[in-house]
Structure formats: structure tokens, C-alpha cells
Amino acid sequence: MTGEPGALSVGAKGFSHAFWWLKGRRILARYAMSVNSDGSGTGICGREVSTLFNPLMNFCIVISLCRRWRTLGNSGVQLLPCLLALSAVPSLAAHKPLVPRPRQIKYGNGRLALKGITISFGSSAAPEDRFAADELASALAEITAESVPVVSSGTAAHGIVFHRSGAVDALPGPDDRTGTDSRESYTLIISNNGAEIRARSSAGVYYAVQTIRQLVEEGAGGSFLPEVVIHDWPALAYRGFMMDTSHGPLPTEDEIKRQINFLARWKANQYYLYSEANIELRGYSLINPGARYTKSQIQRIIDYARERHVDIVPCLELYGHLHDVFRTERYADLAALPHGGEINPRNRQVQSMLQDWVEQLTALFPSPWFHVGMDEPWELEKADSKAAGGVEPETLYIEQLKNITALVREFGKRPMFWADVNSGARIFSRYPELFSQLPKDIIAVPWHYHVLPDYSDFVAPFAQVKVPEVFAPGIWCWDEITPDFIRTFENIDTFLADARKYGTLGMMNTGWADASQVLYRTALPGMAYGAAAAWQTEPMNRARFFTDYAASFYSPPVAAEVAPALEGLAKAQQLIEEILGAETIFRLWDDPLTPERLAHLATQREALRNTRLLAEDAEEHLSRALGLKEDVYSIPSLVVGARMLDYAGMKYIYALEMASYFNTLGSHPSHADVEFYLGRESSARNHGRIMDLMDGVLDLREAYRSAWLSEYTDHRLGSVMARWNAEHEYWRRLQTHLWDVLHGFKDGDTLPTLEELRPHM
């Protein structure tokens, strides 16, 4: 491929095509495009496009050219170049979607067959380069069903050659910046004869590999890579995901590795390990003995992540959220409120303990960043200030923030902290004078998970005092049956757009597990969305995301089932929230037969039915995808989520139906009517509504338990499974109460009310 970057290869016969192509670019630059300094512009197609490689721009070029020539006359001679140029535009729609979308991309009409492909190095290969090559070879071998050799050097035809021009530079530094030649940038050139990856660092090489994995297409002659030139670099230098390992279940070491591997596919470069007190520390064996990671486990996770160019950042709590420590009697008097959750900062023993923790943890985590927590000090006014001798709450807070961040800097780390602006305890909203008192080298992390039209209030104050920030949206799933992707995507997109206006360093997409019941593999699309949104410059295409995500992650037959399933699950979850209100995972276990709930549900019958239809349709798609026997990682938990949504709909529909039977029966029904409505229809030992619910909850319980243990240790499993058992017991008791009525009921007897018969647990 020669000539202008991104231009198609041409021979003598194709010269006129190339001439009109380049002519069109020049005319467009003059007549149709106002180009910005960053290389983008708003063209006649009415959207921002890249000035190189972008197929949308190429289309705009041709249309502009056609319009220009049409004003000069209507002769066929003048129209011919327009038609030739239009015929030369490669169609973006003809190729697989890429997630995240590269900064600059230009397709040609050729293809590089994968049969017999090799991988080699055009520069000295470090272990990181070889890891990337091996990963690509493995991925291509899985597609082609033949081995793909990785050779030490050479530029043989029909091969993929890796070129790294700079140092390995595998992980983000303390103050990275992005740009056309930044650490993570790469250029990928694919032609009929071979492919080249060119990058400054091993990270850039690795991200080019991830793009190649998504580029693979299928044709009559087998698998191939399309002819293309891509130049790509991230919009944000820091693109992280935070996993909560303290509020809910404890992910296994292997599951954390699987999450990291998954995130790397979408070019994330940070993994924040959120820990309140569940990392093994020398001298603190009494803290969370059954729910913590050993230092050797942490080290293995760090090493695994480094191979994939992901930095493991410790995300700790060094002020509040420490109830796991203070519930142990040995440490109870170190809290501001005995057995509470926050330290007494003026206690010297507390400061000694924190110094010990920081010393051990900075030695364990090589990351240049260190998150000290400091969010949600709920006890600050009520207990902390009093325990510290009456110090003003805001003074106590900023004093501890400065002390702990100074300590972190002593150990060579850059500190960051949760900034409660209009979230959590709203410390900075209630005490705005704190903004100007912040150390300038600290990184603020403003966070908010609700959808708002504008998030400027969360980020602008830090920009005004020149304190850098990383913003934190969230995957809305911690208290829900399945993730609310509609809310999640809107939160990420809007927060990201506003944070960029104020020069954000990066994004930390958060994954909380507060209710202890979320199966986090159901949230994988939200993890991918956050990573991709932080990489690409243009806004995410929300309407197409599930389709593009599935096409990028699964084989075509599986993707065809998963994409509509995700669409259905997202709609079903949103609908069940509208019906039941917030925290749907807790609403799943609510008593459905209270008078208040029945009155509300009476207006939601059709919505409940639609929830079930959406969930069942998703389950059907996912079951077909599972039947293809390709993916056993992401799909089984989605099946469980679909079934739980279906159960929620069935439970509340059945509750309405059984309540209506009592209304039909009245106070003094016949024995035959009672036998029919409360016996055969409601409480029959098989094929009745209550038995459906009892069978459903037990079958789901086992599927849920299996899914849980595929992700987590058994920490908190007993507490969670107790909810399933209580749900079954509720329906068993109701069945028993109805049987008691049936066995002695005679014509004309007074029928007990539903309120009298429902279990009161």
C-alpha cells in the first residue's frame, strides 16, 4: 500500500481512480470540510470525522465532489469521475465492527488469507512482545484450526510482522499523556501480501493485536484479514475498572484474572482492586481470616495483569469503611465509634497502624498510583469529631487526607482519593472550602452513578483549583437482578463527555457488589463498554453496542444469539425497575401478597407480562448460544439472570391471580369453588401456581449456586442462599395454610381472608 496514508493500492488501470480520490480530498478540504486542529472536522455529512482513513469521510468526499461537478454542468463526462470515485469507496458496513473504534481507519478492497500465516518480529523481541505474538497465534489458530507459527525474525511474505521502535514501557506511569505517538499508539497495515504492526512500546503492539483479533472475517476461501490501514491511540491515558471485593462476594484469584484478560481485549490499562481489609497483612491475622487474598495471590494477579498491560492499582480505605477491622475486639477501641466503621484520626495507635499498612501495601503493589479511599465518612459529625476532642469535622477530614497522602508519597506513590461532591456523604458540597486546601499532586476521584444531564459540578471545581481528577461512573448492578445497562451506558457517556471538557486524566469504571447477590459475569458488557468509551474519541454507539460487542467477542453464530438476548435483558431489567422500584434484587424476595403491594401491582399486570416475555426470549437465545458449545464463561450467568427476571415476573403475576381468586370467592363460597380456585388452581401438589413457584425457586437456586461458585469463593454464600431457602419456605407455608382451609371447608363456611392466610415472616 503506497501513496497518501490510507489510500488504496493502485496499478496502471487503477490510476484514474486514485487520481479522482486524491482530487476529491483536496476539493473537500476547500469546499466541504472545516478541519479542526486535532485533525477532525464537521463535514457535509453533519458529524465529526477523521481527516484520514475514515470511510465516512471518504463517502463525504465523493458526495461533495459530485455536488461540485454538478454545478459545472450535466455532461456524462463530468459525471463519470464522480461515479468512479463512488465505486472506489470501501464500505464500512461490509466489515466487522471494531470495539473500541480506532481513531483513523481506511479499508481497501484486498484481503490477507490466514491459511499458512506466520508471525515474526522485525525488531528485537522482549518477553512482552512474544506474549502478544503467542496470544495472537493462539487466537488465529482457534479460528483457522491450524497452528500459527511464531518465528524469531524475518519478513517472509504472507506473515504478520511486529515492529517495536522504543522501550518495552508495558504499564501506565504516574503521569502519562496521550497523542499520536504516545506510549499506547500503534499503526496496523494489512495488505494482500502481509501485515505490519508498528508501535513505540509493547503496549501499543498488544493493542494492535487486540484489533487484529476483531478484524478477522470469513469468506468463501476461508478466514482472512481485510486490507486496511489503522492508526490508533487512546483518548484517555488511564482507562480503569474497579472491582469491589469487600461489600459482597470475594472473587476467586482465577476470576480476577479472567476479568483482567477480558478487560485487556477492550484496551483497558488499569484494574483497581477495591479492598477494605481483605488483603493479608503481616501482624493482622484476626482481620477477615476467611475472606482475604494472600500476598502470593496478589503477586500472581499483578504478574498476570502486567503481561496484558494492565496495572493493578490498590484501592483501599484508610479512613472509613473499616468495620471489618473494628468488629474485632482487639481493634474496636481504635474506631471513633466502638465497633463502628471509621478511625479516630487523633489516636496515635491508629496512625501507627495505618503507617504499617501503607508500608506493607506499597511494597506489595508496584503501581505508581495508590488509592487511599476517604469516601462516605458517615460518622464524621456524629462520632469522629467528638472522639478527636471536638475538632471541627471539615478540619479533621482534610487533616487526615493530607496526613495519609503525605505518607503515601513518602513511599514513592502518587495518591488518589474518592471525592464525595454530590455523592455519598457530600463532604465537598457541605464544606466547599476543602477544594482549595487539597494538595496539588493528589488525584481526585469524583464519582456518581445516577443518570444526570450534566456532571460538570463533579469535575469543574477540581479543575478550577488545578487538582487533577479521574472520574468514576458505575455499572448499575449492585442491587439489581441483572445489570441495568441502559442506565449504565448513559451514566458513562454523559459523565465522560463532561469530564473531558475539564481535562480528566482518565476513567475508573466501578463495579460494586453491595447486595452480595450479583453474578458479576452478567456485567461483562458494562465492563467492555467503559473500557471502549475511554479509548475512542467519538461517542459510543449505544444503539448498536450489543450487536457490535457480540460480533467482536463471539463467533458469528453465537453473536447472533447473544446480541438480541442482551437487548432483551436490558429492557426486561429496566421494566422490572419501573414496576418494583429500586433495588430489584431485594424486591425479588419481598412478600407479594401484602395489601399495599397488591394494590400497586394491579396497575402493572401488562408490564409484568412484558417483563416475562422479554426474559424468556433472552433465555431462548442464550440457550441456543450455549448449545453451540463455544462459550462457558459469560453465557451461563446470563441464563441465570434471564431466569431470575422471569421468576420475578411470574411471582408477582401469580400473586395477582391468587388475590383475584379470593375476590371471586367472597366471604361464603361453596366448597366446590374453594376446591377449584384455592386447590386446583393455587395449591395443587403439582401443576398449581404455588408449586410452580416452589419448583422454580429450587431449580433456580441450584443454577444460581453453581454460577456463584464459578466466580467467587464460598464467603457469604450461606447468607445469600438463605434468601432462596426463605423464598421457598414462604410458598410452602402458603400452600400448607390453603390445604388447612380446604380440608375442613363446607358450603357456607366463612373463608379466611388472604391477609389472614399469607405467611407473615
Image (cartoon, rainbow, N blue to C red):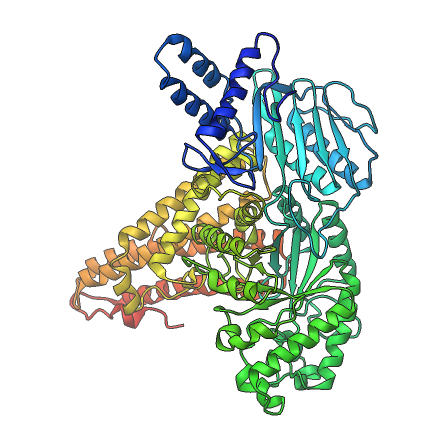
State the quadrant of the N terminus.
top right
Is 229 left or right of 539, judged from the image as shown? right
Determine the image quadrant of residue 142.
Answer: top right
Q: Is residue 745 above or below residue 118?
A: below
Residue at 70%, 40% in the rendered image = 204
Q: Is residue 495 above or below residue 231?
A: below
Task: Choose between 413 and 579: the one closer to the eye.
Answer: 413
Q: Is residue 272 above or below residue 521?
A: below
Task: Choose between 20 and 434: the one closer to the eye.
Answer: 20
Whether residue 66 is visible here, answered yes or no, is yes
**Residue 155 position within the rendered picture, expressed as x and y whole percent measured from the top left:** 79, 22
Whether residue 691 is visible here, answered yes or no, is no
Residue at 27%, 51% in the rendered image = 606
Q: Which residue in the rendered view is the most extreme toward the bottom?
A: 389
State the quadrant of the C terminus.
bottom left
**Residue 145 position within the rendered picture, expressed as x and y whole percent measured from the top left:** 67, 25
Q: Is residue 129 above or below residue 302?
A: above
Is 108 left or right of 31, judged from the image as shown? right
Task: Choose between 448 and 180: the one closer to the eye.
Answer: 180
**Residue 83 position within the rendered picture, expressed as x and y whole percent measured from the top left:** 43, 14
Residue at 55%, 35% in the rendered image = 98
